[in-house]
Image: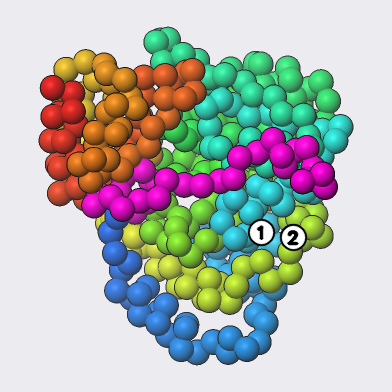
């Protein structure tokens, strides 16, 4: 089509693998059911809403709830239809021609897609090789050098996805003190890692921290992401976001989930315990190397072609993620932590695949 922008033509459609798998361990989801009070609250929200009317476009009550959870002021919270929309809005407001978007590689794929679509110059900084003494470490000096050359946005996931490693917060703060760039830190796995820069946003107006309810809160299908940023950044995003971007049902259920955040803590603890057992199980298999992780997923290398292992697992009803297309991850697969039963079946089938 002649009218299609070249940036759009360069992007393949986003098509997650269609899953008919019995055990789904590919998207880092929380496998446990919603706590009963949250499930009941969702039913009540649906019963009470007037769906014939538009909701609160500013998500005022939800923003106040998220602000209390994060320990910031409501005017420092921006809500989006998942973190993907927030990335899109950030690049609509601050990206485009004449700007540079800097991301590590490998990392969350949406950064790359949205940077290209915005028309900005995309610069990818490879992480340290898996064979190095500090696997997948971020070259912060290289990031700072690139970010100082021209107006830039730096996107970093911490802990990183798909590698699972944690970047020292003090390294990230150097981007703010040694450049004039906007730093966006995606803390999608904050509840698992327990490390955050949210409290630094008040000191650094060019820092923005992104979070989601899709992981620890088990609400991936609800699509709610939020950004903690200076009031000036939030106001800029409000200029360019779509009206009513977070629907009224999502607002109500998300508010109930965050108000009951304490009910998700036992699930997080259980998943971390299962992750550690899963990591030990992977480490016990000959020729297989699991990498250290601060998330609910594990990146691991296999001694056989990763695509072959993936296909054999899928044939056995288990879906994980093949990340081996990236040269730095050429022997690697990624598995989410499931329930104890799911993890046990996965390990047994993986052992059979490697035999």
Q: Indicate how the structure is coloured in the image.
A: rainbow
- Counting every numbered tag in the picture gives 2
- The answer to whether 298 is drawn above or below residue 244 in the figure is above
Q: Which residue is at a point 27% across and 18% down the rendered structure image?
A: 304
Q: Position of residue 148 (x, y in %)?
A: 78, 22
Q: Secondary structure at mark 2?
A: loop
Residue at the image position 14 percent from the left and 41 percent from the top: 344
Q: Residue at x 59, y 45 (%)?
A: 13
Q: Work out whether residue 349 or residue 223 is closer to the camera in this orientation and state it.
A: 349
Measured along the vertical axis of the image, is residue 151 above or below residue 272? above
Q: Is residue 231 visible?
A: no
Query: Which residue ends up furthest to the front in the rendered image?
Result: 1
Alpha carbons under labels 1 and 2: distance apart: 10 Å
What kind of secondary structure does the magenta stretch mostly adopt?
A: loop
Q: Quadrant of residue 208?
A: top right
Cβ–Cβ under 8 Å for marks 1 and 2: yes
Label 1 or label 2, whichever comes before in sequence order: 1
Is 254 left or right of 85, judged from the image as shown? left
Quadrant of residue 173 within the rendered picture:
top right
Task: Look at the image and say whether residue 241 sits in the magenta stretch.
Answer: no
Q: Residues within 10 Å of mark 2 (few under 14, many from 20)?
A: some
- Expressed as whole percent of the image width and height from the top left, the position of residue 233 reads 76, 51
Instruction: From the viewer's perspective, tell me whether residue 347 is left or right of residue 185.
Output: left
Q: Is residue 17 above or below residue 239?
A: above
Towards the viewer: 101 or 272: 101
The quadrant in which the C terminus is found is: top left
Residue identified by numbered label 1: 78
Q: Which portion, as a residue range, is magenta?
A: 1-30
Q: Is residue 16 magenta?
A: yes
Circle 2 is placed at which residue position?
241
Q: Give coordinates of residue 201: x percent, y percent.
A: 66, 45
Q: Residue at x 23, y 40 (%)?
A: 315
């Amino acid at each position: 089509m002649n009218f299609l922008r070249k940036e759009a033509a360069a992007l393949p459609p986003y098509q997650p693998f269609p899953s008919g798998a019995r055990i789904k361990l590919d998207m880092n989801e929380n496998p446990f059911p919603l706590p009963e009070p949250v499930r009941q609250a969702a039913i009540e929200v649906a019963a009470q809403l007037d769906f014939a009317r538009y909701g609160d476009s500013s998500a005022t009550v939800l923003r106040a709830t998220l602000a209390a959870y994060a320990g910031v002021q409501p005017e420092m919270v921006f809500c989006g239809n998942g973190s993907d929309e927030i990335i899109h809005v950030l690049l609509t407001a601050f990206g485009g021609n004449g700007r540079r978007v800097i991301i590590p590689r490998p990392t969350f794929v949406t950064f790359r897609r949205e940077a290209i679509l915005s028309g900005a110059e995309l610069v990818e900084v490879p992480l340290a090789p898996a064979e190095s003494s500090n696997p997948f470490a971020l070259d912060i000096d290289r990031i700072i050098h690139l970010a100082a050359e021209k107006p830039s946005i730096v996107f970093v996931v911490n802990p990183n996805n798909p590698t699972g490693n944690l970047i020292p917060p003090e390294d990230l703060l150097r981007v703010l003190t040694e450049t004039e760039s906007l730093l966006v830190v995606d803390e999608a796995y904050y509840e698992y890692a327990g490390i955050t820069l949210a409290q630094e946003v008040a000191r650094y107006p060019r820092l923005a921290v992104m979070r989601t309810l899709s992981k620890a809160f088990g609400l991936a299908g609800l699509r709610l992401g939020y950004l903690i940023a200076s009031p000036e950044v939030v106001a800029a995003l409000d200029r360019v976001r779509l009206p009513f971007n977070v629907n009224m049902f999502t607002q109500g259920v998300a508010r109930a989930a965050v108000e009951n955040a304490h009910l998700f803590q036992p699930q997080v603890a259980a998943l971390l315990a299962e992750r550690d057992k899963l990591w030990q199980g992977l480490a016990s298999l000959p020729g297989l190397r699991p990498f250290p992780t601060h998330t609910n997923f594990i990146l691991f290398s296999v001694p056989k072609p990763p695509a072959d292992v993936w296909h054999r697992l899928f044939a056995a009803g288990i879906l994980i993620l093949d990340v081996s297309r990236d040269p730095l991850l050429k022997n690697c697969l990624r598995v989410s932590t499931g329930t104890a039963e799911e993890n046990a079946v996965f390990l047994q089938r993986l052992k059979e695949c490697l035999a």
